Amino acid sequence: MSKIKNLQGCGTALVTPFKTNGDVDEDALKRLVDFQVEEGIDFLVPCGTTGESATLSLEEHLRVVEVVYKHTDGRVPVIAGAGGYNTAKVIDMAKYVADLGVDGLLSVTPYYNKPTQEGLFQHFKAIAEAVDVPIIMYNVPGRTSTNLLPDTVVRLCHIQNIIGIKEASGNIGQIAELAVKVPNKFTILSGDDAISLAMIALGGKGVISVAANQVPKMMTELIHAGLDGDFERARKLQCKLFPLMKVNFIETNPIPVKASLAMMGMIEESYRLPLVKMKEEYRKELQHVLKELDLIK
């Protein structure tokens, strides 16, 4: 098993930068990786929802993962996205991604076809049996219309290479139940920046963060303060960063975070349809938050 067996801390759900012509901007992607590592991030997660994976071709998806993994060069672990609603195709993608040498996979629950809990169990079991790398499941009902319930997670956590879950249901009661029922070795990561600290108090071990694209150092400090039990410091950082956590979802993720990175001079502001640039009134609100954090002038 790889070095992410005891994964914890702050990981970044990396955006995928595009050029104005729509091509993946590999130079900007490398700059983002360097920025993240230099700011002290614990691990990187390319080609998830924030990375607009739904609009990447398989070739592009694999290339983005390859660029991130090679450019990271072992400085931090890389956990690559490999999910979807067709189990057979997800297995193929997972095999391709695993062959690139990544440290683990992040696999979202199937969306649109709304499988039962037994279907979800069989889906993740099949992926785990097909690859020999650690797998972190991703539960985000707000996007998938499917909720991976605690009892199903308990069944899945006994499969050796299913090591954790990115939990973004937003249901604190469900998260508390999950934390009670899974073994301590099983990693619960927040999929929602705003409640990461609360999840750590319940037994979570970190976050896969959107805001870490913009403020990797501060998000990492927040998470580690919580993990170290320094909740006074953690709460101060939470209060400082909460406006950013909130504004990042003023429109559909990753529209605001990519707009932010463009304002910060790190990428071109380019999306793929059906995502488009944010409304002007929201842009002004975003600029205000970025200025308060001294991210732009």
Image (tube, grey):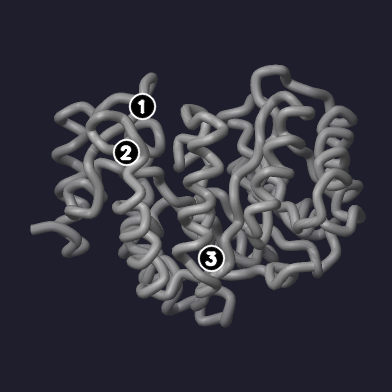
Residues packed near mark 1 inside 10 Å, few (<14), some (14 to 19) or many (20 plus): some
Residue occupied by mark 2: 18
Using residue 232 as the reference point, say whether residue 21 is left or right of it: left
Q: Amino acid at mark 3?
A: Phe
Say which quarter of the image contains residue 81: top right
Tell me if label 2 and label 1 are in contact, CB under 8 Å.
yes
Return the x and y of residue 204 as percentages of the image width and height.
66, 63
Residue occupied by mark 1: 272
**Which comes before the other along the chain, label 2 or label 1?**
2
Residue occupied by mark 3: 43
Mark 2 or 3: the one toward you: 2
The span from disc 3 to disc 1 (Cα, nearest Å) is 26 Å
Tell me if label 2 and label 3 are in contact, CB under 8 Å.
no
The span from disc 2 to disc 1 (Cα, nearest Å) is 8 Å
Q: What secondary structure is found at the residue carrying circle 1?
A: loop
Q: Amino acid at mark 1?
A: Arg
